[in-house]
Every structure is written in C-alpha cells, then in structure tokens.
Image (cartoon, helix red, strand yellow):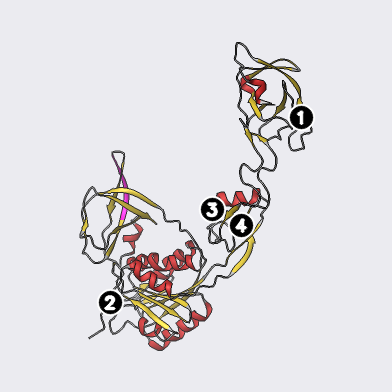
Amino acid sequence: MPEMFNVLPPADALKVLLDRLAITIRSENVLTAEALGRVLAEDLTAPHSLPAFPRSTMDGYAVLAESTYGATETLPACLTITGEAPMGRQCTLAVSAAEAVLVHTGGMIPQGADAVVMVERTQKVDATTLEVLRPVAPGENVVGVGEDVMEGSPLFPAGHLLRPQDIGGLMALGLTTVKVAARPRVAIVSTGDEVVPPESVPGPGQIRDINSYTVASLVSRAGGTPILCGIVGDDYGQLLDALTAALKEADMVVVSAGSSVSARDLTAKVVGQLGEPGVVVHGVAVKPGKPTILAVCGGKPVVGLPGNPVSAMVVASLFVTPVVERLQGMKQTLRRTVTAKLTRNVASAPGREDFVQARLVERDGERWAEPVFGKSNLIYTLVRADGTVKVPLNASGLYQGDQVEVELY
C-alpha cells in the first residue's frame, strides 16, 4: 500500500517551510532607474530636505499674507510690485508689507513672503501697482522647506518593494543607486517520460512541457531568476543527479510532477536524499494540488509540484511565490484582488481550501465572477480565467450571488 498524505492547511504548510529556512539575503547595488520591482536591502533616509527651498505652487504674486487681509473685489488691497523671481536661480528679492513679487509655478519664494496670490485673483493697475481681489492665508499656494520630506527622515525600510513613484522619489533626492536584494536563482526541473520540450512534436502518449514555463513566469514576476533545467525521465538516478546539480546552482529548486505517492512518483524519495532536514510537508489540504512536497535541503527550499498544469500553478502561487519573496526579504506583497458576485453555486468539501478559476464579467453595471470549471490537467482552464476564488477551509461551498474576492493573475 502506498503511503497516504498527512495534509496541512496551506498557511500552516507554508509556515512549516519558512520556519525551517535560515535566510541570508544577498545584495547588490543597481541604478535606481533600473530598480523597479526590486526589493531594498537596507533602510533609506532622506539625505536632505525636499523641497530644499520654499516654492510657489501657482503663477501669481508672493506677498505677506497680512497685506491682503480684508481684500475684496470692491475694496481690493493695493500692493507695490517690486520685481520678478527668476526661475531656476536664487531669488535675491525680499518682500515687505504692502509689496508683491511676481512668481511662477515651481519658482523660489522671495525672502519675507509667506503666501502667493493666484494671478487670477489680482489685476494690475500699472507696471508697479497691483490690486489683490481676495485675501490669502499664510502658507497658501506655497510649499515649504521639507514639506515633502525632511532631512534624515525615514524613506523606506529594508524589504520594501520599489514602485514607480518610489523611483521618482529617490531620484528627487539624488539617490541614483540603491542597494537591493539579489534576485533569487530558482532552478526548475520538469519530470516524466511522457513530457517533451514545447518545440517538439509530441508522439503518441507524449505531452509538451507546460509547467516549466508557467512556473518560470511566476518566479520572474515575484522577482526571481528562473533557471530551466530541462526534463528528466522517471528514473531515480537521473532525477537524483539532476536535483543535486540544480541545488548547487540555485537558491531554490522547484520540481514539476512526481509528487504523489504512486509507484512511479519519485520526487519525495529523491528530495529526501538531497540534505537535511529533507521533506517537511507532503500533502496540503488544497484542491487542486493536494500532493505537494515542501522541503529544506542543505538550507535551501525545495518545492515539489503536482504535474497537472492547474494544480501546478495553484501550488506555485501558494508556495513558490511567497518563498521567492522571502528570499529577497520582501516585507509586503502585491496581490491584486477585486470583489465580485458569484454567478453560480460552487460546491466544496470541508477540510480543504478549494481554488476555483474564475472569469470576470460585467452585468447590468455590476462585476460578476463566473467559475471556469475544468479538469486540473487542462491548461486552458487557466487561460480562460482572470483569477481565482478561494473557498475557505471549512466551508461546504459558495452560493450564487455571494460577494467573493478574486485574486487576479
């Protein structure tokens, strides 16, 4: 009799794996302009204040706010224009009571001024006389020194995933290089006598390799560097050699297929020979993807995926993606989710988490999640879906009209 699984809920299984990993994060310096999607390897603080000088947010006139108090269109405040603040240069002008200096958006505020009157709320009487039609408050239409960020204040912690706006913020402070976590190298091994490369024409009983490429894409999206190690047949010695070589080359190994408990499923036995402690989880309370292997071998994570494409992608999303993120020290993830109403009932069995493929549709101005049912060995079950809906561990299903969360691909 083959050994049966002792399954764990996905969150518990992931915790078992991560608790066994002693992670050392490698780092490297990269150009900030090329750091989108990278994970910071150190805390960053502001080297100086931003802005470094008081700036106008409007085209108008820099004034002392008190010089405009009580101004109305019928009884305007009358000010003397003493000059114009230059753009891109130090402003040497100063403003006193009842004076105004012409300023442009982004220009430096002259000394003494504490507000800017929008040009639309003024009218010139002559070259040196200005009427202000509405009062301004101190600080109005002005960005003060350090109002964006103060010198020495924290910017981002280590483990922060850099977004487009973060790149701009770093550039604004002159931080043109950053120290980031090196991309984890993830070796991907596909197994099975029936599996052939995608460029081959499959013969009778053969199928093209799918999982290597879906998993590689997930690894890339999570910030890792996939290493495709090819296809290994159902042979113990060949698989042991391939995984031993992969473990030496990479920071993590992912094996596709052979994770179940039948006579031809070798992955768990081979992984157990790669290093201590070996397999820490064999079987997860999830559908599809129950025959999942999680291991730590010589300090490196090894994940054994089921061979069916839907199962492999569900399991890779649950375990490969978070481990790749953890290997970079990532503090937050970018899971994109939307809410939608379920178009039909979805049955499940208590004691496992079901991941149902779903397509998003619009009906009468509302967003609906339409289940995409199909066997787990059919890749186009995934292709036709926009994301997944999770049926909770102890639920017996979901009902038509339920509000559900769809995690987008």
Image quarter of residue 285 = bottom left
Q: Which mark is residue 94?
A: 1
Question: Relative to residue 206, is residue 28 drawn left or right?
Answer: right
Name the chief secondary structure element in magenta: strand
- Residue 180 x %, y %: 59, 63
Tell me, yes or no, whether the highlighted magenta stretch contains residue 361: yes
Q: Earlier in the sequence, mark 1 or mark 2?
A: 2
Which residue is the site of mark 4? Answer: 44
Are there few (<14), some (14-19), or many (20+) residues within 10 Å of tag 3?
A: some
Q: Indicate which disc, 2 or 4, sits on the residue closer to the N terminus.
A: 2
Local secondary structure at mark 4: strand
Q: Amino acid at mark 1?
A: Ala
Q: Which mark is residue 219?
A: none
The residue at which mark 2 appears reads as 6
Q: Is residue 1 left or right of residue 122?
A: left
**Circle 4: is it few (<14), some (14-19), or many (20+) Cα within 10 Å?**
some
Q: Which residues are magenta?
A: 358-363
Spatial CA distance of label 3 from label 1 is: 40 Å
| Image quarter of the N terminus | bottom left
Depth order, front residue of 376/77: 77
Helix, strand or loop for disc 2 = loop
Measure how far apart labels 1 and 2 are at the Cα level: 78 Å
For the point 28% across and 77% down, which residue is it? 6
Look at discs 2 and 4 and give the one toward the viewer.
4
Residue at point 74% right, 32% down? 111
Residue at 73 percent across and 35 percent down: it is 87
**Mark 2 and mark 1 in contact (Cβ < 8 Å)?**
no
Distance, label 2 to label 4, CA atoms, is 44 Å
Inspect the image, locate mark 4, and give the three-letter code of the amino acid beneath it: Leu
Q: Is residue 9 left or right of residue 147?
A: left
- Where is residue 59? Give x, y as percent: 65, 28
